[in-house]
Image (tube, rainbow, N blue to C red):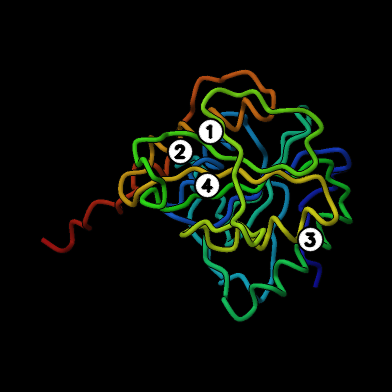
Amino acid sequence: MSLINFRKPVNLSGFTLIIPAISVGNVPQLTVDLLITTLKLENVASLWHPGVQPSVGADPFYSNEKTFCTACELYVNEARKLAVLQFRSTIEVKLALKFIEDLIDGITELKFENIYVLATGFDYELHNINNKKVYYYAINYEEKVEIEDAKPLEKTPQGKFKISGSGLAVKLYEAIEDRLKATLLVKYVSEGDNLYDAKCFFGKLLEFLNLKSEQLIFPTSWQYVYGTPPPTGLF
């Protein structure tokens, strides 16, 4: 079975792809939610892999739709040449490296021009937890990134990244950068109500993508971040 199963043919050559790593507060996934609704991306494919825990649910963006969502899906805006992956479940630890390998093979075959990996880390790792900067690392940038409150992400003396709470983000980025132009964007957050963090991350991502700020459109699922109301049948 193919890794990415398209519902309709789409030529993604030259597109930018956003990949949200499953990390602290699910802020990367919330940020991608905002990208999909605000920039009006269309669901064009599902991603199936034994390393992704299967799941299915109602459409997370529009309550009046009769469609459903699965564990991992691909959304695109062809006019903007922008694509995003959205994860709705976790990655099996034992199959994580195989998943990364197969994913990179798949996106390389589709000829994406730029890849952005979004991640979050525990803000207690910072010397000053009030620091709201977004950190980035992009080995292929030919010029300095001049974005307010964006700071280069530094490696450890051993030449490695250490971002506690970022899940597979570092492994994914390091595997991608060997083959494609890639950027790692990190925001440090705390667990809790992370909707504000997602809105901030969304704004900074637009700056990196050189896209104009848009009026935010919130997905229906954001009404139930802490679960749906209790069923009336309980009372």
**Residue pushed farthest bottom?**
94
For badge 4, the amino acid type reads Pro
Q: Position of residue 187 (x, y in %)?
A: 49, 42
CA gap between label 2 and label 3 equals 26 Å
Question: Local crowd at mark 2 within 10 Å, few (<14), some, or many (≥20)?
Answer: many
Q: Is residue 75 left or right of residue 190?
A: right
For badge 2, the amino acid type reads Ala
Task: Give me the disc on residue 202.
Answer: 1
- Tag 2 residue: 198
Q: Tell me if residue 222 comes above or below residue 57 in the rendering.
A: above
Q: Quadrant of the C terminus?
A: bottom left
Task: Give me the disc on residue 104.
Answer: 3
CA gap between label 4 and label 1 equals 9 Å
Q: Is residue 212 left or right of residue 217?
A: right
Kindly state the secondary structure of the residue where label 3 is placed.
Answer: helix
Task: Give me the disc on residue 28.
Answer: 4
